[in-house]
Amino acid sequence: MTQLQILLASLVKAALTTDDAASLRWREEAERAQAALAAEADESGDLKIDGIWTLAVREAESPDLQASEGRVSLGMPAACPFRLDELKAPGFDVDSAVERIAASASTG
């Protein structure tokens, strides 16, 4: 799994869960994945971020996690709500990203 997919899946998991401790764990995982992603050489020319987003959402919505996911009742948007340069930027704010995902999901 790529660092990008780990980052996106962790953000979605943090946005979906109602358990504060679980949300914190997912946010910490997202921070680690974002740091690793930011440190990678830029080889994103052919990267299909929406496809990776779809895989990340599927992972986050897996049946084994659904019991703890009650924060957002509607589905995730089909397109990734972030650009790759945002996700790789220094100072990327995981908490704001989680809230952005929750807001985009709750409004459809």
Image: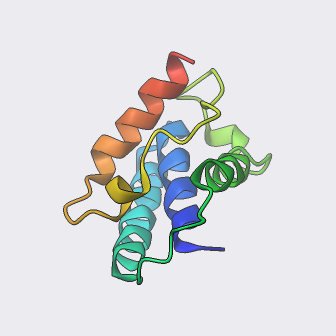
In the displayed image of the protein, which residue is found farthest to the left?
91
Q: How many marks?
A: 0
Colour pattern: rainbow
Q: Quadrant for the C terminus, please.
A: top right
- Residue 52 is drawn in which quadrant? bottom right
Taking the image as shown, residue 94 lies to the left or right of residue 68, namely left
Identified at 38% across, 68% down, the residue is 34
Q: Is residue 66 left or right of residue 73?
A: right
Location of the N terminus by quadrant is bottom right
Q: Position of residue 96 (x, y in %)?
A: 29, 42
- Please say if 86 is above or below 71: below
Residue 27's place in the image compared with 96, above or below, is below
Residue 36: x, y in percent?
40, 79
Of all residues, the one furthest to the top in this rendering is 107
Q: In the picture, residue 77 is in which quadrant?
A: top right
Residue in view at x 65 percent, y 33 percent = 78
Residue lying at 61% horizontally and 50% vertically, measured from the top left: 53
Q: Is residue 59 or residue 85 the one in the foreground? A: 85
Q: Seen from this angle, which residue lies furthest front?
A: 45
Q: Residue at x 48, y 40 (%)?
A: 15
Q: Position of residue 72 (x, y in %)?
A: 55, 26
- In the displayed structure, 47 sits above or below 78; it is below
Q: Residue 73 or 91: which is nearer the viewer? A: 91
x, y percentage for residue 86?
Answer: 33, 53
Left or right of 19 in this view: 108: right
Instruction: In this rendered view, identify the residue nearer to me: 104 or 26.
Output: 104
